[in-house]
Amino acid sequence: MLVSVIIPNYNHAPFLKDRIDTVLNQTYRDFEVIILDDKSKDNSKEIIEQYRGNEKIAHIVYNDQNSGSTFKQWQRGLSLAKGEWIWIAESDDLADENFLEILTQQITSKVGIVFCRSNLIDENNQPITLYNFTSMPDPSVYLEFGTDFKAKGDDFVKKYMLGMNAIPNASSAIFKKGLVQNSIFSEAGKTKLFGDWLFWLHLMKQADITYLFNTFNHFRFHQNTVRKDTLHSSVRLMEYMVLVKYVERYFDLQDESLDCLVYLYLSGDIPRSRLTLKEHIRLNLFVFKRNPTLLLKSYFRKLKK
């Protein structure tokens, strides 16, 4: 079974050779590699050209101008992919050599996503602790992720994809290409932080999911990591409203997703002082329109504490 490995790159030259090598050295050998560079300003092209002619490299594509969206690169890669399954191998992450071998063993007719736990590493490949996590999902915080399991897509969404994105790193997962509809890329492209979250929801409404406890993937955080400085940003709340709308359309979980939004607003780690008056009004109206009593109940619960 052919797996198409898409490596989307932008200014990750310091990590790019290690990333490409950990893909080419996979013990599972039925794969092709598609390298996409989004008009990098560093010496990424020089590194990529070293691999031209490698029998596993199916495509090398350099954009004439920056696309402005990771998900345009994902979409481009999928349009070139010949494999039945896809691995988005982000250009600054790493994988163990048996990553594909282990994950492809979990594929069944009903499974559309297989993912594993990820170790967190820094610029020098050293383990780090971030947000009190040493891995994601961290089983010391989310106990359910302390062992392998399989779940129906709807059930996984209800339990693990409303209050958090349980697949925070695309490099940790492989997914079935046939599940992807192009419409999801236009939706994901409208967000700065939650595009991958929407993407996984899109797949989970169609297929089951398998999780592996062992860490075959290494999720790198460094100075240019997109999410690095956004944990406490009001953008998270604004984009969570996009998430609620998506859940409304495809899952019978509107109240649960709204409750998560209100919790983030009233009790989460985003200081409400970071929201503008316009953002406060927008969020309150959004919730009130869908469940007029939810905000009041939540305010009262907060006051009692």
Image (cartoon, grey):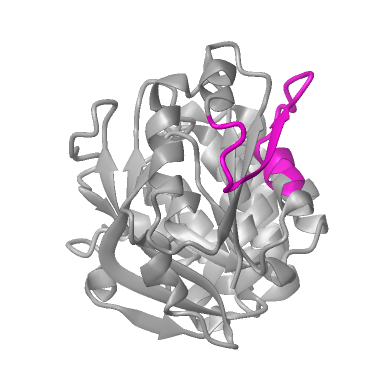
The image quarter in which residue 30 lies = bottom right
Residue at 42% over, 56% down: 172
Q: Is residue 64 magenta?
A: yes
Taking depth in this image into account, of 115 and 134 the one nearest to the observer is 115
Any part of residue 175 in sight: yes
In the image, residue 98 sits, relative to residue 95, either above or below, namely: below
Residue at 69% over, 50% down: 285
Farthest residue to the bottom: give it.
109
Residue at 72% over, 22% down: 66
In the rendered view of the protein, which quadrant contains the C terminus?
bottom left
The image quarter in which residue 63 lies = top right
Q: Is residue 20 left or right of residue 63?
A: left
In the image, residue 202 sits, relative to residue 63, either above or below, namely: below
Taking depth in this image into account, of 12 and 134 the one nearest to the observer is 12
Q: Is residue 273 magenta?
A: no
The image quarter in which residue 277 lies = top right
In the image, residue 106 sits, relative to residue 9, either above or below, namely: below
Q: Is residue 68 left or right of residue 173?
A: right
| Residue 60 image offset from top left, x and y in percent | 68, 34
Q: Is residue 99 left or right of residue 81?
A: left
Taking depth in this image into account, of 189 and 251 the one nearest to the observer is 189
Which residue range is magenta in the image?
Answer: 51-76
Residue at 47% over, 65% down: 297
| Residue 26 image offset from top left, x and y in percent | 40, 55
Taking depth in this image into account, of 283 and 95 the one nearest to the observer is 95
In the rendered view of the protein, which quadrant contains the N terminus?
bottom right
